Image (cartoon, coloured by chain):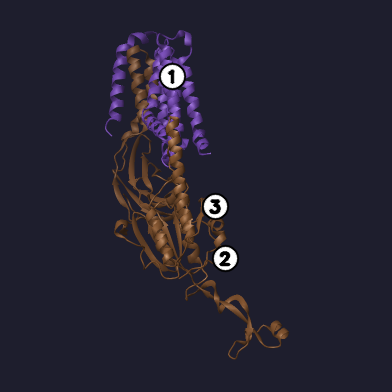
């Protein structure tokens, strides 16, 4: 594995090129036929190949310098990255580079630059910590009769999920005391008009509403809504991953979580994340660019530094400040998570579930007998009823469940809750 | 679009491989026994040479995750088939086909020129290089073609058939030279 940095010297082992092998075959076959059939013209046929092979012993370097430049180490799904590589110490011949991509990496054609750097574009197709692949360096001598191949392992790249589009936010009726950008119910110093009231000494004169003052005969004042920040905690359920790779429940969940985090952080809210996967990991709510990076890293990379799920009895208190909005992104296949949601609701948290279940169990696809197929249909029906029951029980508890297919933005999915405030009982 | 870009330099290879096989096979009436089998082998090797050239081994790396087990087996099989040097097979088969015909020196030398052209075109297409990279080899190729023409003259001499002894000696020396050039890497 070669990482970006200074030039490294790599030993080169030369061998016959494909052209040289073909010419040797042509010459030997023609000479053999010439001797066997006693036909002089076949010996003449071997002559051009024989002469072209003569300069093969010219000098070739025993080692070349390989250097990789620091490219983008973080990409978003579908975004193009570039590997920059430079080969030194091989000026006489030609150099070709080829990227052999790893899984979920699409490689483009290599392009040598005028500055001596070769640019190899690639695109990461799925989120996660992904190896880019292997860089193959093919060296040819001046006569193209000798060839050397070097294989260089490339570093990994962090591919962030493509955030789901979300323009309208779900906002709670009761917000925290921190200043923010959401209009609260209480009057304050914001810019959203809330109403008018009578002037009292000490009020600012610039807020006098002159038309209302003229109508009522007493001095009337504009009042504005206070602007407060919301604390939002995203509960990302990666416990089970079903569905086709690239469009599985985990893929949809991380894209939704990335979109939610980006949208709420852009609105200057404090956002936290609880990742409910192989381990329980969390980031306490905070705001700012650094928090966005931390959340995206936790979503994209399973660092394995959390607490084992078996050792955790309940969701961490530190990640769930009172009055927070909990947005759960889950396929709702884990009964333990469903129990945790009930507990959250009992503790008074306003909770909304984005259901990303997009697949059904593959039961009965290979069955031939009609009796087996009927049993499989029954099993699938039971499974669907159980899923419906889970969602129904959550709705009965006051936890809205909305379904997202991963194709459209989250705005349509969350529309019923972005047009009115969500009431929390805390 | 990318497949077309790869196919464009391959047109020359397709034309040359088809031309050499046909040239070596003609005339069909005068060929010795077994020429039909050798013609089939030459055609098969030529077709697989072109198929190997047109398929990109790196292209199947990324999207293969969604493919089924059948596609995986097919890809492994094609990777194994690709590893066989079909161009060398074509060369030997075409020379064998030519040898099965009666002596015709000019015909053989033209075939040799076409064979060299086919091998050079195949190399250029495989390495995505332009003809300019072969400029250093032009004098050697010209000298080789001159020797080939001389061999036609030698074959036309009345005593050429009796000179098989010196021909064998020269051929053995030339073969040793080829082996010496090829072996020490």
Examine the rendering and report whether any part of residue B63 can be seen.
no
**Residue bearing mark 1:** B109
Question: Quick check: do tags 1 and 3 share a chain?
Answer: no
Provide the chain ID for the residue under circle 2: A
Q: Nearer the viewer, residue A70 or B26?
A: A70
**Same-subunit check for callouts 1 and 2:** no
Q: Quadrant location of residue B101?
A: top left
Image quadrant in which you'd find residue A62: top left
Residue A159 picture location, percent across and down: 42, 53
Q: Colour of chain A?
A: brown
Q: Colour of chain B?
A: purple
Compared with residue A284, is residue A332 higher up or lower down, i.e. above or below?
A: above
Q: Is residue A360 above or below residue A19?
A: below
Dot 2 surroundings within 10 Å: few (below 14), some, or many (20 or more)?
few
Residue underneath mark 3: A408
Upstream in sequence: badge 3 or badge 2 = 3
Report helix, strand or loop for mark 1.
Answer: helix
Question: Taking A422 as reference, is A387 above or below it?
Answer: above
Q: Residue at x 41, y 14 (%)?
A: B37
For marks 1 and 2, give the one nearer the viewer.
Answer: 2
Quarter of the picture containing the C terminus of chain A is bottom left
**Residue behind mark 2:** A420
What's the CA distance linking mark 1 and mark 3? 67 Å
Q: Toward the viewer: A145 or A4?
A: A4
Chain ID at mark 1: B
Residue depicted at x 45% and y 39%: A378
* Marks 1 and 3 in Cβ contact (< 8 Å): no
Depth order, front residue of A33/A272: A272
Q: Residue at x 30, y 15 (%)?
A: B168
Residue B149: image x %, image y %?
Answer: 43, 20
């Amino acid at each position: 594995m070669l990482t970006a940095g200074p030039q490294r010297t790599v030993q080169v082992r030369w061998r016959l090129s494909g052209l040289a092998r073909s010419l040797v075959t042509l010459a030997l076959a023609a000479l053999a036929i010439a001797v066997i059939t006693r036909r002089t013209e076949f010996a003449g046929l071997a002559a051009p190949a024989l002469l072209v092979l003569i300069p093969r012993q010219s000098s070739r370097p025993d080692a070349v310098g390989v250097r990789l430049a620091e490219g983008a180490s973080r990409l978003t799904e579908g975004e193009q990255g570039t590997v920059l590589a430079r080969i030194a110490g091989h000026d006489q011949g030609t150099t070709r580079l080829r990227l052999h991509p790893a899984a979920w990496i699409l490689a483009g054609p290599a392009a040598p630059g005028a500055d001596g750097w070769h640019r190899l574009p690639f695109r990461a197709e799925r989120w996660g910590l992904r190896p880019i692949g292997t860089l193959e360096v093919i060296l040819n001598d001046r006569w193209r009769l000798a060839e050397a191949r070097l294989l260089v392992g490339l570093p990994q790249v962090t591919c962030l999920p493509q955030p789901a589009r979300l323009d309208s936010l779900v906002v709670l009726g009761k917000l925290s005391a921190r200043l923010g950008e959401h209009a609260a119910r209480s009057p304050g110093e914001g810019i959203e008009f809330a109403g008018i009231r009578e002037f009292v000494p000490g009020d600012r004169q610039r807020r006098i509403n002159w038309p209302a003052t003229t109508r009522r005969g007493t001095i009337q004042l504009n009042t504005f809504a206070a602007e407060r920040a919301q604390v939002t905690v995203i509960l990302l359920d990666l416990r089970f991953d079903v569905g086709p790779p690239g469009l599985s429940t985990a893929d949809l969940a991380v894209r939704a979580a990335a979109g939610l985090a980006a949208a709420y952080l852009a609105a200057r809210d404090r956002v936290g994340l609880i990742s409910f996967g192989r381990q329980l990991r969390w980031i306490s709510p905070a705001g700012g660019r650094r928090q966005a990076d931390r959340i995206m890293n936790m979503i994209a990379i399973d660092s394995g530094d959390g607490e084992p799920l078996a050792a955790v009895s309940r969701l961490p208190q530190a990640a769930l400040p009172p009055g927070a909005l909990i947005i759960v992104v889950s396929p709702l296949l884990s009964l333990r998570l469903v129990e945790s949601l009930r507990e959250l609701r009992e503790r008074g948290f306003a909770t909304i579930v984005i259901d990303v279940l997009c697949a059904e169990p593959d039961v009965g696809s290979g069955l031939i007998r009609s009796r087996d197929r009927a049993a499989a249909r029954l099993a699938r029906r039971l499974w669907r009823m159980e899923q419906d029951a889970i969602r129904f029980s959550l709705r009965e508890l006051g936890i809205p469940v909305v379904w997202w297919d991963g194709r459209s933005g989250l705005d349509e999915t969350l529309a019923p809750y972005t047009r009115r405030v969500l009431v929390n009982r805390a | 679009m990318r497949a077309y870009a790869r196919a464009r330099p391959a047109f020359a290879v397709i034309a040359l491989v088809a031309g050499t096989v046909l040239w070596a096979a003609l005339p069909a009436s005068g060929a010795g026994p077994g020429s039909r089998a050798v013609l089939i082998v030459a055609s098969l090797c030529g077709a697989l040479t072109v198929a190997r050239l047109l398929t990109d081994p790196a292209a199947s790396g990324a999207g293969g995750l969604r493919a089924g087990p059948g596609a995986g087996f097919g890809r492994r099989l094609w990777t194994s088939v690709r590893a066989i040097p079909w161009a060398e097979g074509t060369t030997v088969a075409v020379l064998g086909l030519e040898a099965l015909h009666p002596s015709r020196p000019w015909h053989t030398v033209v075939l040799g020129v076409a064979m060299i052209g086919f091998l050079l075109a195949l190399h250029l297409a495989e390495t995505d290089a332009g003809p300019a990279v072969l400029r250093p080899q032009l004098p050697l190729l010209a000298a080789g073609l001159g020797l080939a023409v001389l061999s036609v003259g030698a074959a036309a001499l009345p005593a050429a058939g009796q000179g098989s002894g010196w021909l064998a000696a020269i051929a053995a020396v030339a073969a040793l030279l080829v082996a010496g050039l090829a072996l020490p890497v």
